[in-house]
Image (cartoon, rainbow, N blue to C red):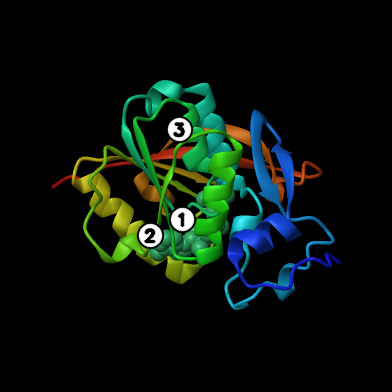
Amino acid sequence: MTECCGGSDPLDEIRCRLRVAPVPGLPGLLLYCAHPGSGLGQIAGGGASPYWAYPWAGGLALARYLADHPSAVAGSRVVDLGSGSGLVAIAAAKAGARAVLAADVDRHAVAAIGLNAALNGVAVATCRADLTDGPPPDADIVLAGDVFYAAEVAAKTGAYLAHCAAAGLAVFVGDPGRAYLPIERLSRCAEYDVSDFGDGRSTTRAAVYRLDRLPA
Ligand SMILES: C[S@@+](CC[C@H](N)C(=O)[O-])C[C@H]1O[C@@H](n2cnc3c(N)ncnc32)[C@H](O)[C@@H]1O
């Protein structure tokens, strides 16, 4: 168990409990990641699951896609919805996006995104908010890595992403085939074998999709 984590500042907790680790399949990209001694259950504030402490399979696929196809985001204004660790936002910035906003509802995620962006030497703006309550963002592209993991979250993010596509934004989703993925509205762009929870030990198949604009 980590002994140094007495405070409740998310930045201190992340720096203290997590370790900087390379991201499998994404050479040069580093993230603060949980390890067996992290004691994540003792994170101050409790409640929210520590989704920000690992790169998720959907995000890994989307980040790989951006590394392979930087022209998908180069020069564009990008929003990463449900950014978690900031993995996808960082990959977009590394691929040459003009501006990147990483949004998450979790205060630890927002802290992790800032730390991880600095670790990778890229500029990523952060926003602790539920963007799905509002209109499509003032951006060109919305990226969403692994945001269909639970029914309620999938309903909100799915509806929001559909609004974004209807408003003319390009929408890319990374997902390992979760139960709530709205597959009927998605066009597959690429598939990758990615590490599950970023631990490098087991792999799963995950795909990158483009969300189709529904006919008016
Ligand atoms: C499974 S994690 C994926 C994180 C990251 N995209 C990845 O692939 O590694 C999903 C993230 O979405 C966030 N989230 C869930 N609902 C959200 C919402 N309505 N608005 C913004 N973030 C949300 C959660 O807090 C969590 O960090």
Q: Which type of secondary structure does the marked residue at label 2 adopt?
A: helix
Q: Choose top left, top right, bottom left or bottom right for residue 117.
A: top right
Tell me the amino acid under the disc marked 2. Thr
User: Which x, y percent locates residue 59?
Assistant: 55, 44
Q: Is residue 143 left or right of residue 54?
A: left
Where disc 3 sits, the SS reads helix
Which residue bears the numbered disc 3? 93
Mark 2 vs ligand 1: CB below 8 Å: yes
Q: Label 1 is placed on what type of residue?
A: Gly
Q: Is residue 216 above or below residue 108?
A: above
Label annotation for residue 105: none
Task: Look at the numbered discs 2 and 1 and tell me whether their residues touch, using CB distance below 8 Å.
Answer: yes
Q: Determine the CA span between mark 3 and mark 2.
A: 22 Å
Residue at 58% over, 35% down: 120
Residue found at the far left of this picture? 216
Where's residue 54, x and y in %?
66, 52
- Whether disc 1's CB lies below 8 Å from ligand 1 is answered yes
**Pointer 2: what residue?**
157
190 and 107: which is toward the camera: 107
Q: Is residue 172 left or right of residue 2?
A: left
